[in-house]
Image (cartoon, grey):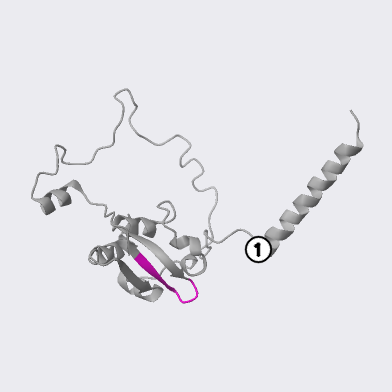
């Protein structure tokens, strides 16, 4: 997880007894001692609870919270306690006073005949072949709604022309 957002995770874990934690975007920036990315201000999906969405999502999910009532205009949201705090075996053992289990650490299951995990040869093969301009927002949609509508209308016209051409020809 990203160290930048760890403070938010700690903040939410410290409020685990609460069912909801309401925060403004500015309050989150104060907690993380940094700025949120620009996409957090303009794209509602940035605040989704999909763990593959962004690094910060994993932080609030690991703290046992999920986002709700995201108000993009008012720049505020509610973190709802989902009661699913991700804890280590050691933390569970300390809390219960019982041994955490046989294993000291969590290990990934791998069949005995499996090769060691490594990188695929193509990973990194294009390194240095292109650059992303500083300040470019990769989460911004590629087309605005007007461009997308125009593109879809053009696609429909093309499909109609192809269909008419196929009806005119006989095998």
68 or 89: nearer the viewer: 68
Disc 1: CA contacts within 10 A as few (<14), some (14-19) or many (>=20): few
- Hey, which quadrant is residue 152 in on the image? bottom right
Is 143 drawn above or below residue 34 in the view shown? above
Q: Position of 105 compared to 1: left or right? A: left
Residue 164 appears in the rendering: yes
Which image quadrant for residue 60? bottom left
Q: Is residue 109 above or below residue 149?
A: above
User: In the rendered image of this protein, does residue 108 appear above or below residue 42?
Assistant: above
- Residue underneath mark 1: 145
What SS does tag 1 mark? helix
**Above or below, 119 relative to 88:** above
Task: Give the residues drawn in magenta, as a range.
Answer: 72-79
**Residue located 75% across and 50% down the image:** 155
Q: Is residue 56 left or right of residue 6?
A: right
Q: Residue at x 43, y 68 (%)?
A: 69
Please state the horizontal and vertical placement of residue 96, each as a whole percent of the image.
Answer: 11, 51
* Number of disc labels: 1
Residue 61, horizontal then vertical, whole percent: 34, 56
Furthest toward the left, the residue is 97
Q: Position of residue 133 (x, y in %)?
A: 54, 61
Image coordinates for residue 57, horizontal then vertical, percent: 38, 58
Q: Is residue 2 visible?
A: no
Q: Residue most toward the top?
A: 113
Quarter of the image holding residue 63?
bottom left
Residue 42 in the magenta stretch? The answer is no
Position of 111 with respect to 88 (left or right) is: right
Q: Which corner quadrant holds the N terminus?
A: bottom left
Q: Quadrant of the C terminus?
A: top right
Query: Which residue appears at 40% of the width and 37% of the height?
Result: 119
């Amino acid at each position: 997880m990203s160290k930048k957002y760890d403070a938010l995770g700690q903040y939410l874990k410290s409020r685990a007894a609460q069912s909801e934690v309401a925060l403004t975007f500015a309050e989150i920036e104060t907690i993380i001692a940094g700025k949120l990315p620009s996409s957090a201000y303009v794209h509602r999906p940035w605040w989704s609870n999909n763990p593959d969405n962004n690094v910060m999502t994993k932080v609030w999910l690991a703290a046992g919270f999920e986002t709700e009532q995201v108000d993009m205009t008012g720049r505020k949201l509610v973190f709802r306690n989902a009661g699913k705090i991700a804890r280590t075996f050691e933390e569970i053992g300390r809390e219960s006073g019982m041994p955490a289990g046989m294993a000291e650490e969590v290990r990934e299951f791998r069949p005995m005949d499996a090769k060691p995990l490594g990188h695929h040869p193509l990973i990194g093969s294009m390194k240095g072949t292109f650059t992303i301009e500083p300040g470019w927002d990769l989460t911004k949609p590629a087309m605005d709604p007007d461009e997308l509508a125009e593109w879809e209308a053009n696609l429909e016209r093309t499909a109609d022309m192809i269909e008419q051409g196929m009806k005119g020809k006989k095998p």
